[in-house]
Amino acid sequence: MTSPTEGPGDIGAEWLRTAGPDSDVVMSSRVRLARNLAGFPFLPKASREDRRQILDIARRNVLDAALAKQVMWVDLADSPTLERQVLVERHLISRQHAKGDEPRAVAVSSPDERLAIMVNEEDHMRIQVMRSGLALSEAFDHIDSVDDSIESRLEYAFSPRFGFLTACPTNVGTGIRVSVMLHLPGLKLAGEIDKVRRAAKGMSLAVRGFYGEGSDAVGDIYQISNQTTLGRTERQVLDDFERQIIPKVIEYERHARRTLIQMRRTLVEDRTHRALGALRSARLLAADEALQLLSLVRLGLMLNLFSSDGPELADVSRLMLLTQPAHLQKAIGRTLDQAQRRIARADLVRAEIDRGRR
């Protein structure tokens, strides 16, 4: 298998480069489509042979569709556990998709990793496009083109009454899920993060952590996504997110940052400079601790608190990924226990945090 990442150099993942619109708050935008093949049972009722046939059909049609300059196909059942976990950490497959030995795979556009197609996860195919910053319209235009290309080669399970048929009833209709990954350290420091949770709950939105469903908001990183699609068009869902919901969250966060600088500047400077000092000198670092420290340094960079002494934003963004357990072990080149990972992570951070300033 060719890996999406080859050590601690360029991360490849376009969504993590902090180059898109409103990227001081919005780290990435993702649009996902759930699709199933006509003539096959949904996966909870599918046999191993059904899954194998679905995999073969998807592989042939996805690769023949020329969806990107280069598409990497990964058979997950044959992949080592570490390689699967790397894909989870890069948000290319779900944690559920990484488990088990049933026939399943993922297709990934390389090297930008904007496009990923999970095969035999919850549905026969889960197509996703990720972009840096608040770029849902661009992501949708991309995924719409990909979806049309695949649909021209095979038949989807579709009902004239209900729309696209999916394993989970909440996805029936358009099959679309829209989500944004947000960095909200200002609201967290100000003790106002519950404002976002309450607003999301009132609009039937899901608020999750860095790795989506079932994960915690480590490093002040949150994902907000829609939960239902039936009775709404793709554009209605997108417009809600891009023009109403997310702009409000962005303004909440920016207001919190401005207020903190005006009212509690010394506290913010202390937290951000302490975080940078810890990253530059630590000899032991746990994964969650590293992500939290990097979150504070990212905040300091966005608020211009480090003058000429701060690291490059690209280095901080890269380390948010490279300090995760699977990426760390891949960079080192061997499996490490938890104690060894804490040492190796601190070594890596000290070596990489000021890479762009050398």
Image (spheres, grey):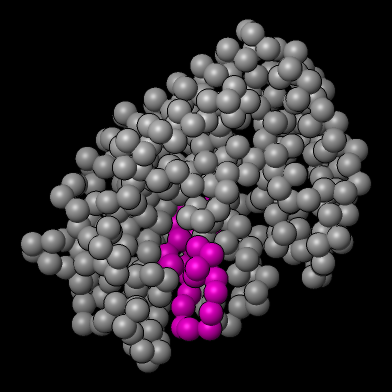
User: Image check: 356 left or right of 113?
Assistant: right
Magenta-colored stretch includes residue 114: yes
Query: If the image is split into quadrants, where does the C terminus sit?
Result: top right
Q: Nearer the viewer, residue 255 or 350?
A: 255
> Residue 193, image x and y in percent?
52, 30
Report whether residue 200 is seen: yes
Q: Nearer the viewer, residue 79 or 68?
A: 79
- Image: magenta residue range: 93-119
At x 39% / y 26%, what residue is drawn?
A: 247
Query: If the image is split into quadrants, where does the N terminus sit?
Result: bottom right
User: Image check: 168 left or right of 251?
Assistant: left
Name the image quarter holding residue 189. Answer: top right
> Residue 106, image x and y in percent?
48, 70
Q: Nearer the viewer, residue 232 or 33?
A: 232
302 to 209, vertically: above or below = above
At x 70% / y 31%, what residue is drawn?
A: 296
User: Image check: 58 left or right of 267?
Assistant: left
At x 71% / y 19%, what residue is drawn?
A: 268
Magenta-colored stretch includes residue 120: no
What is the number of callouts on the image?
Answer: 0
Report whether residue 186 is seen: no
> Residue 229, image x and y in percent?
24, 51
Name the image quarter holding residue 356. Answer: top right
At x 22% / y 71%, what residue is drawn?
A: 156
Secondary structure mostly taken by the magenta-highlighted segment of the chain: loop
> Residue 178, image x and y in percent?
36, 47
236 to 184, vertically: above or below = below
Name the outermost residue toward the bottom.
49
